Image (cartoon, rainbow, N blue to C red):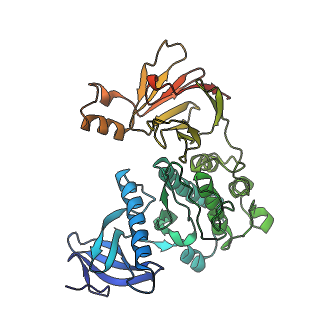
Amino acid sequence: MSFAPQQGAKIVSRYRLEQHLDSGGFGDAWLAQDTHSGRKVVAKVSHTNNYDIPVIEKQFEREWDVLEHISNAGDHSNVMSLIDTGTQGAHWYTIVEFIDGTEVHHYVRDNGSITDSDQLREIGMDVCDAMAFLHENELVYRDLKPDNVMFEAGLSPTLIDFNTARKMQPGQDMPTQFRGPFKAPEISGGQGDAGPWTDVYSIGKFIFYLMTANVERGDDVNPLDFGIQVDPYLAKIVERATSENPGTRYRNATVLKRALREREPTPPEQAELRWLQDNRTFSVHPGDTIGRDGGEAAIMIEDPTGHVSAVHAKFDKRGNDQWVVEDMSLNGTWIAKKDDSDFKHRALSDEGKRRLKQADKAPKNVDNFPKSIVVGEGDIIALVHPDHEIWLKVTLNN
């Protein structure tokens, strides 16, 4: 039976199209009802004309890959969730959760700018939290703008479009051909590479847009220079986030969220890691990740064996100012405390535990391995296993 996307039509005899919502370059978005559960969903259905069909199919496959990756990582409250994918006739379709809210550009158009600093701060922290989740799971969003965010009740933001998001792949550049004032200058128009630092730039421009109902095309934008009355700390945070120089920006969304939470534009104190086998040193900010060379981790280590994950571990600071290392790998992260003679502590991600059990290689106490471990002055971190000999000595600067 042939299928044509129109009101009343069903996708795989389950998702009934009820209202056309929007059209894009690759397909149409429809409000639909899941006739099995009764809940509202959104169906994105591909075009079958006016575009190169292989390009459309590739685009749908890419978005499926990203959304499935997010789903496998456990989803996030500020990120749209995937429900179903597939093909029907000549059409490709993606079914995602229905977000009961308003696209940000429609909200600002109808209600004007948001000038309350506390409200802007809360929105910014939620967006940072969503971006940090993506970065921790080896994804770069690349296209934050008002069209791609919806406000739910209480102005809670949700990312809704993943057409340009990409998985971080070792050795793979990720420039984007699309230009725009929300994109960092080093990637706009296909120049340079995307990473957490480029999403930080877009978050800064997004907050500026909420303040002004407009967006400045330049860099290093300070709202106070445009007559916007917001708290000075927030203006300085936006200015740093939108710096032309990636090295001046907040290193990642976790650091930017911390700046907003603490109302402190100055980045927090750094720690230092010294690679004992190579004698190189690396500065570490809260939220920084470490992984193998060629990926998108903030700190990259050469590992010809490939056992170090693209994003292997994450560093952060707890409320009591203790540094912690959180394992995000399949193999684990080992710690030798300053006064220990060997590596007695092992952190392992939930996925790493699951894989070991699946391969019947899990030690009896695997469920007792924490995901994160507090690290202090003089501790040594070993990626993968102590025998792998990628050892990093911790020096604290605070």
Q: Is residue 392 above or below residue 139?
A: above
In this rendering, position of residue 194 left or right of residue 343:
right
* Residue 4 at x, y percent in the picture: 29, 86
In this rendering, position of residue 346 left or right of residue 39:
right
Q: Residue at the location (56% across, 64% down)?
A: 144
Residue 31 shows in the view: yes
* Residue 111 at x, y percent in the picture: 59, 77
Q: Residue at the location (29% across, 73% down)?
A: 87
Q: Residue at the location (49% across, 36% down)?
A: 304
Residue 99 shows in the view: no
Q: Residue at the location (31% across, 83% down)?
A: 18
Q: Quadrant of residue 267?
A: top right
Q: Quadrant of residue 120?
A: bottom right
Picture quarter with the C terminus: top right
In this rendering, position of residue 297 left or right of residue 215:
left
Given residues 201 and 329, the one toward you in this image is: 329
Furthest-front residue in this view: 304
Q: Is residue 266 above or below residue 64?
A: above
Q: Quadrant of residue 379?
A: top right
